[in-house]
Image: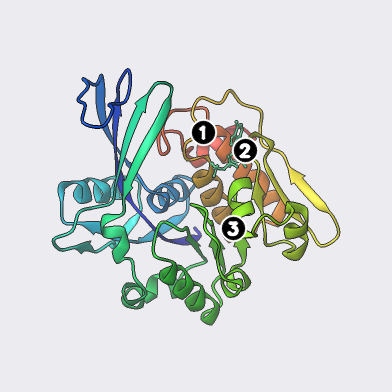
Amino acid sequence: MVHITVIGSCSMDLVVTAERRPLAGETVIGNSFQTVPGGKGANQAVAAARLGAEVTMVGRVGDDVYGEKILENLRKNGVNIQFMMPVANCASGTAHITLAEGDNSIIFVKGANDFVTPEYLEKTEEAVTSTDIVLIQQEIPVKTVEYAAELCSRHRIPLLLNPAPARSVSGELIGRAAFITPNEHECDVLFNGMPRSEALKQFPNKLIITEGKNGARFFNGSREIVVPAFPVEAVDTTGAGDTFNAAFAVAVAEGKKMEEALRFANRAASLSVTKFGAQGGMPFREELEKHR
Ligand code: ADP
């Protein structure tokens, strides 16, 4: 069994559906309310665990009821939560989502995710130093991502940086990552609008651009290669990128070469969009093997 450490965010999504969203100062009656665990870190940890990896998550929850539910969900999915220390007198991360008029609007409150600091990583260092690969995203402070990259390079642990949500990052961070996996929009932000094929050429076998239903693209040192996604009836693409990243990390840790690892990631992510919800659609290993 391969071991993956995910350093990242977790949150509770509070989802309301209504005919329309309220104007400032107005109250409207909604149709339904649901709480769903999310956050890119937790999503990727759950996806990797379902794909058969031994997963340790490094993150923070608040000392509230959402924190308990977030931890319970991770535990239920087989994720090691030993390094998920609650922050006292702090709210867990929450995403306040309104689904109305055919679109969503979201207010994200970082809460305890802001306490995933470099100092916290120092305390949980063994989770980073004794693993096959570290998977990280950008819903935690930038300083922490940079420190994680430094730790990984010091201990020669490959780092997979999923640069989502989009922000520009230092050249040093890019240099230290083994793989970087932006979607098209994130790629444009990351490289300041540089043509994508130029960016790919600069980072052969490292930069992987995901392209939704078209799959993923990288430069292998001599030419661009597109690894296609699988044709499916897409129902909900929330969390597609999270499944892709988790599956790619599992495949790399298992020793698969680039193209084979990307096929595995595409297969998992394509399956995930056929069901509702970010975590709801994440496939288990057996389902994936069936669709070979
Ligand atoms: P993100 O979810 O981060 O925006 P993408 O939209 O690029 O990222 O999707 C990530 C991966 O999910 C793709 O590379 C592909 O494997 C899979 N995927 C996304 N949308 C579809 C789709 N409509 N059909 C099949 N696979 C999809």
Q: CA distance from mark 1 to mark 3?
A: 26 Å
Indicate the amino acid at tag 1: Thr
Asked whether 269 or 260 is in front, the reply is 269
For disc 3, the marked residue is 254
Give the image location of residue 48, x and y in percent: 47, 50
Q: Residue at x 43, y 28 (%)?
A: 276
Location of the C terminus by quadrant is top right
Q: CA distance from mark 2 to mark 1?
A: 9 Å
Q: Nearer the viewer, mark 3 or mark 2?
A: 2
SS class, disc 3: loop
Labels 3 and 2: the sequence-earlier one: 2
Task: Using residue 222 as the reference point, say whether residue 86 is left or right of it.
Answer: left
Indicate the amino acid at tag 3: Glu
Indicate the amino acid at tag 2: Gly
Q: Residue at x 44, y 67 (%)?
A: 142
For disc 1, the marked residue is 237
Give the image location of residue 143, x and y in percent: 42, 72
Q: Ligand 1: does it lie within 8 Å of the C-beta at label 2?
A: yes
The quarter of the image that holds ligand 1 is top right
Q: Ligand 1: does it lie within 8 Å of the C-beta at label 1?
A: yes
Residue 212 numbered tag: 2
